[in-house]
Image: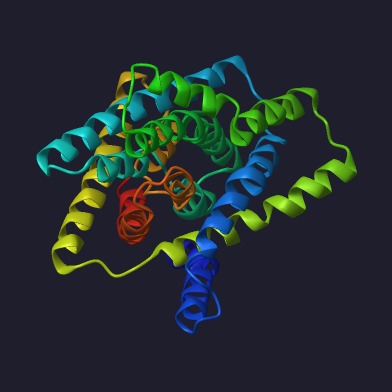
């Protein structure tokens, strides 16, 4: 557990540093729009290509896409149910959906799996993360964020609003980069200049996402803390139950079953802030939800892996 916490120190230290600079007046909150735009349009697409460059795909790996789709259906349904139960506004409902349909596998789960499993098992986790969760996050979650953004910005919403959102997503840099990344992976393009360039740019991803979270973060009201903790707990529990169900239904080997459970139970990803900022959703609340979910995940998932 100590090793896992040590791996998260740079991320949380960046958040603390940026927040201090903001409090001292060196960074204005308006800077968040610039950070969000750079992260979404430049760094995230390059980061996606960087992730996919060394992945060798097999036909059998299609199962991870199926696992991701099943997880998204469950998480989406639970988020909508919570929205109805708590009578959330459309803005908050869209933000909750984006949070539930994001998974911080890299920050929390990667270190746990690297410390406790073989390298081959870790590579299976990367495949599930990239093609089962991250790919759907960058397409379905973005489409939903865009749709709710349209609901909030348009006086009249017509039947084609979701279709327009899908078209917008299809033309976005993050989706285009996935096809480029897939081509790089399949064609094994390893030109030194290209590799060094997108490695250099992608290294800024964690810094910018942590900066985005720091600028969005504010202390919630007492009543809001309970709701945030409840939503984060429900997301964690939903992930554990869904992961176990997938493992049982598909009769997965023990090591693969365990990484599927851990990844599906991953906390809210700070990357979700990119979409809430881009589409005009509740970025401040998403920052609070992300922070609570991350802290809960760091406390619970090491216990889960000890039980597994």
Q: Quadrant of residue 206?
A: bottom right
Q: Percent x, y for residue 245?
A: 28, 27
| In-front residue for pair 239/282 | 282
Rendered-image quadrant of the C terminus: top left
| In-front residue for pair 136/303 | 136
As displayed, is residue 195 above or below residue 73? below
Q: How many marks?
A: 0
* Residue 103 visible in this rendered orientation of the protein: yes
| In-front residue for pair 137/241 | 137
Rendered-image quadrant of the N terminus: bottom left
What's the colour scheme? Answer: rainbow
Q: Percent x, y for residue 239?
A: 30, 39
- Residue 47 left/right relative to 147: right
As displayed, is residue 73 above or below residue 31? above
Q: Residue at x 32, y 60 (%)?
A: 288
Q: Residue at x 48, y 76 (%)?
A: 22
Q: Quadrant of residue 47?
A: top right
Q: Percent x, y for residue 270?
A: 45, 53
Looking at this rendering, what residue extends furthest in the front direction? 155
Q: Percent x, y for residue 289?
A: 31, 55
Q: Residue at x 34, y 51 (%)?
A: 282
- Residue 261 left/right relative to 109: left
* Residue 252 visible in this rendered orientation of the protein: no
Q: Residue at x 42, y 43 (%)?
A: 103
């Amino acid at each position: 557990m100590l090793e896992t916490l040590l791996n998260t120190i740079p991320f949380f230290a960046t958040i603390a540093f940026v927040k201090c600079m903001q409090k001292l007046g060196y960074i204005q909150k308006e800077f968040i729009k610039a950070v969000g735009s750079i992260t979404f349009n430049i760094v995230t697409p390059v980061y996606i290509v960087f992730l996919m460059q060394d992945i060798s795909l097999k036909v059998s790996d299609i199962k991870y896409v199926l696992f991701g789709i099943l997880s998204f259906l469950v998480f989406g349904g639970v988020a909508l149910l919570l929205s109805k139960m708590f009578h959330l506004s459309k803005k908050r409902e869209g933000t909750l959906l984006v949070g539930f349909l994001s998974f911080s596998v890299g920050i929390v789960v990667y270190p746990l799996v690297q410390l406790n499993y073989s390298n081959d098992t870790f590579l299976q986790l990367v495949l599930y993360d990239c093609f089962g969760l991250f790919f759907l996050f960058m397409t379905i979650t973005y489409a939903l964020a865009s749709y709710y953004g349209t609901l909030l910005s348009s006086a009249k919403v017509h039947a084609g609003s979701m279709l327009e959102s899908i078209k917008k997503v299809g033309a976005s840099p993050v989706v285009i980069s996935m096809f480029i990344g897939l081509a790089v992976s399949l064609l094994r393009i390893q030109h030194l200049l290209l590799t060094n360039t997108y490695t250099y740019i992608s290294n800024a991803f964690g810094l910018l996402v942590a900066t985005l979270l720091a600028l969005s973060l504010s202390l919630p009201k007492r009543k809001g803390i309970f709701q945030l903790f409840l939503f984060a707990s429900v997301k964690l529990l939903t992930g554990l139950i869904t992961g176990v169900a997938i493992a049982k239904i598909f009769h997965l080997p023990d090591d693969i079953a365990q990484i599927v459970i851990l990844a599906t139970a991953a906390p809210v990803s700070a990357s979700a802030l990119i979409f809430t900022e881009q589409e005009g959703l509740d970025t401040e609340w998403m920052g609070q939800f992300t922070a609570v979910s991350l802290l809960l995940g760091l406390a619970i998932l090491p216990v889960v892996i000890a039980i597994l």
